[in-house]
Structure formats: C-alpha cells, structure tokens
Image: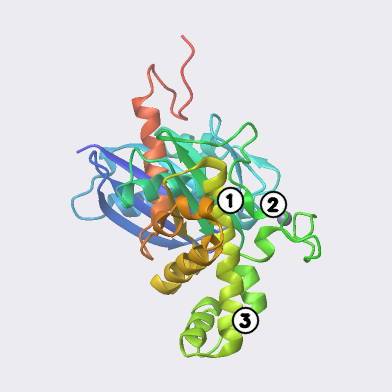
Amino acid sequence: MTLLAGIDIGGSKVLAVALDEAGTVVAQTRLASSGGPAGVVATAIEAVRALGARPGVELSEFRAVGVGVPGLVEPRSGAVSHAVNLGLVGTVDLGAMLGRHLGLPVVVENDVNAAALGAARVLDLDGRDLAYLSIGTGLAAGLVIGGRLRRGARGAAGEIGHIPVDPDGPVCACGQRGCLETLASGSALSSAWAARDGLSPAESLFAAATAGDPAAVAARDRFTDSLAAAVRLLVLTCDVETVVLGGGVTDVGSALLESVRDALARQSADSPFLASLELPQRVAMVAPGSAVAAVGAALAGREVLTAPGPRSPIGEPVVP
Ligand SMILES: [Zn+2]
C-alpha cells in the first residue's frame, strides 16, 4: 500500500492522519504540541511514527508527508514565518528540517489552505470552487479555485479577517481598526459572551440563545450576521460554489450553520441581486473532529509525487 501522512500542527495539539491512494483516512493520531523548531520537528516525527505503529500501517509505506501550520508559508521551500503560536521566531526552514529527519518528501502548507483542500475531499466537493472559512481565534479563508489552492502573489489570499468593516470598531491586532475579525471570530465571541457551566463561550452563547435569553439572542445574531458578511464577501469576490465553515467555533454544531443561513436569508431579503445568488444554500460545515487540515496537508504532500520530474527529499525539483 502507498500512504501519505498529513500532520496539522496547532499551538496546543497535533492531529495526524494516514491517507491511502484513494484518499481515505486509514489511521489517525493526536498528540500534544511542543513549541520551538526542535519541538515542532520532534512532534512531527513522533506523529509519523505513531501512525506507522497503527494496525495495518507500515512506516515504509509512506511516500510523502504534508504538514499544515499556522503562519505564512513559502510553499516551494517549506519555509515558515510568523508562526508565533508554534514558538517559531523569524523564518524557519521547516520543510527542509523535516525532510532531513524523515527521509521523505515534505510539503508545508498554511493550515487554513490545507483545511480548504481537506474540506473539498471530506465533503466530496472535489472539482467545485470552494472557500473554507476558518472561525478560530482569528478569521481567515482558504480558496480552492479550479481544483487548486489560490495562495495569491504574497500568500495573503483569503485573509478576509483583516478587511476593515467598522470605522468606529476596536483596534485589531494587525493595527487597523474595526477588522471583520474583531466581530466574527472565536476571540470576538469570547469578548461578547462569557463561558458558563463548563461549556466553551460559543457553546454557552448558543445554548442561552436557544433557551430564549434575549441578550444571548442579540449577541448570537450580531456574531452570525458578521459571519454571514464574511460568507457574502467570499461569494461576491470569487463566486465560489460553496463556503465551508470550519475551525474551533464550529464545535457548536448545526445551530451555528442554521444561524448563519438565517442571517444570509435576512441580508438577502431586500436585494433581488443577493437573493438570486442563493447564499444560504451555498454554506456548508465540516463535522467536528473531521481533521480536514491534516487530510488536506496529506493531499498537499501528494502533489510532490504527481509533479513531473525527479525530486529531492524536501520536495524541490532536482536540477539535472
Ligand atoms: Zn486586522
């Protein structure tokens, strides 16, 4: 069997999957993260070893490794910068370091981009243009257009969380004022609603809104109106067929999806133009725990194998 390993390295946890040739997950593992370049490399190696120890999987069957990380990634070299959550300072040649240790081609991709590739596979949307909207601590989108990731000229395609939408809003971590991320993100939700009863802030808010608490209903609707604005923005910019909601806030489940669909319907009510775009029907959500970023990282790794010409262990074309 030929296998691909996909590793989603986050600030607190690492999810890894083994994919077979058909793109099916045949093994999965979850580890705690370690920070810094040495910690990130050690955790990635441990993840591949843990996958290789699973029943029916042999380490020798892995042909390539894809890694998803939060930060700016130079996909050709695998160099990573601005990955502060992983304790990576400056620019780190993560792809080359991992390739040397693993002895396999390694592709590094931004985690939201990887999740976009993974969502297309997990939701069986291969071949359709889609945007994956990651609603985590921040807000960002990954774009798959014409079957390929659209990273942009400087890797900033899809950074819609930093589009200013409110001139009187709070100053964003990026230095601008009133960015979409200050309204529609896990951080924005935590500022608007305190966690209760051992639930996450998002779960607390949606439970209270469902129970009819007027303050919760208002806070939920403000939050999902802003998410709906993000969906509208993605469709009006790229006309993607589907916008997939993902990220930590989607642990709330279908109540979030329904609330965003309701908001899109309200926003379309006075505009025959928006209504004609059928926005509510174009929103989807990945099931919590479906490891889309790890699956997408593995699929990114596969591109090394299918690209023409011989390749070095770090995935760069070998110059004849
Ligand atoms: Zn910003």
Q: Which residue carries the number 3 mark?
A: 193
For residue 312, say whether it is visible: yes
Q: Do labels 2 and 3 touch, CB within 8 Å?
A: no
Query: Mark 2 to mark 3: distance in Å?
Result: 23 Å
| Front one among 246 and 302 | 246
Q: Residue 79 carries which label?
A: none
Q: Is mark 2 within 8 Å of ligand 1?
A: no
Q: Which residue carries the number 1 mark?
A: 233
Three-letter amino acid code of the residue under disc 2: Ile
Residue 272, given in percent of the width and then of the height, sits at 51, 54
Q: How crowded is mark 3: few (under 14 residues within 10 Å), some or many (20 or more)?
A: some
Three-letter amino acid code of the residue under disc 1: Leu
Residue 88, given in percent of the width and then of the height, sits at 64, 49
Q: Residue at position x 39%, y 31% from top?
A: 303
In the picture, the quarter occupied by the N terminus is top left
- N-terminal of the pair, mark 2 or mark 3, is 2
- N-terminal of the pair, mark 1 or mark 3, is 3
Which quadrant of the figure shows ligand 1?
bottom right
* Vertical comparison of 195 with 61: above or below: below
For residue 69, say whether it is visible: no
- Secondary structure category for the residue under label 2: loop
- Secondary structure category for the residue under label 3: loop
Residue 55, given in percent of the width and then of the height, sits at 20, 55
From the viewer's perspective, is the residue at label 2 or at label 1 nearer?
A: 1
Three-letter amino acid code of the residue under disc 3: Trp
Q: How crowded is mark 2: few (under 14 residues within 10 Å), some or many (20 or more)?
A: some
Residue 156, given in percent of the width and then of the height, sits at 63, 41
Query: Mark 2 to mark 1: distance in Å?
Result: 10 Å
Q: Which mark is residue 163?
A: 2
Q: Do labels 2 and 1 touch, CB within 8 Å?
A: yes
